Image: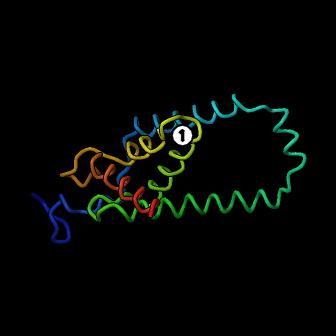
């Protein structure tokens, strides 16, 4: 077994590993489908009325805070992974964002399944992130949220 920095490949950080192109496309298509579903089930007349009464400065602040929350959750999710399986922060943030969109549109917290599947990679011996590690991190995250 080869090693880098004196560590066997099995314990090397998975930094920079990206999901396969098929998985990235599937996640993107599922996210787009959820957004289309949300817009298709929106009353545009009521939305127009609500936008006329909107204070866009407060809306901008709310959207900014929401974006910061997604970044913070992505960073937390990344840190909860063991060092050898840790996704890069960008992938973790994308996983959180895609999962939240799916949770808004799909029942049964399907966004959690989407983000764990997006970040999991085959080949744990090659520094990948197993599905079991992703599920374990998700369980720890939910326990921390409940505490």
Q: Residue 31 sits in which quadrant?
A: top right
> In the image, 51: left or right of 31?
right
Q: Quadrant of the C terminus?
A: bottom left
Q: From the top left corner, tell me how far across and down residue 99 is, in percent.
A: 50, 45
What residue is rendered at 86% in x and 56% in y? Answer: 55
Query: Around disc 1, counting alpha carbons within 10 Å, would you say few (fewer than 14), some (14 to 19), or many (20 or more)?
Result: many
Q: Residue at x 20, y 62 (%)?
A: 11
**Outermost residue, bottom direction?**
6
Q: Residue furthest top?
A: 40
**Which one is nearer the viewer's eye here, 104 or 108?**
108
* Residue 23 screen position, x and y as percent: 40, 38
Provide residue 47's location: percent of width, then percent of height: 81, 38
- Residue that carries the numbered disc 1 in the rendered image: 102
Image quarter hosting the N terminus? bottom left
Give the farthest residue toward the left.
Answer: 1
Q: Give the image's coloring scheme.
A: rainbow
Q: Residue at x 26, y 44 (%)?
A: 122
Placement of 123 over or under 88, stated as above or below:
above
Q: Secondary structure at mark 1?
A: helix
């Amino acid at each position: 077994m080869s090693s880098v920095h004196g560590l066997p490949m099995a314990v090397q950080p998975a930094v920079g590993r990206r999901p396969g192109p098929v998985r990235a496309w599937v996640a993107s298509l599922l996210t787009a489908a959820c957004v289309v579903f949300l817009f298709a089930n929106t009353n545009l007349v009521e939305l127009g009325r609500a936008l006329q009464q909107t204070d866009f400065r407060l809306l901008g602040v709310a959207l900014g805070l929401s974006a910061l929350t997604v970044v913070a959750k992505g960073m937390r999710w990344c840190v909860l992974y063991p060092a050898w399986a840790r996704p890069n922060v960008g992938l973790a943030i994308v996983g959180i964002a895609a999962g939240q969109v799916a949770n808004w549109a799909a029942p049964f917290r399907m966004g959690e399944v989407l983000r764990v599947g997006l970040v999991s990679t085959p080949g744990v011996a090659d520094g990948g992130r197993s599905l079991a590690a992703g599920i374990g991190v998700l369980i720890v995250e939910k326990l921390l949220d409940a505490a």
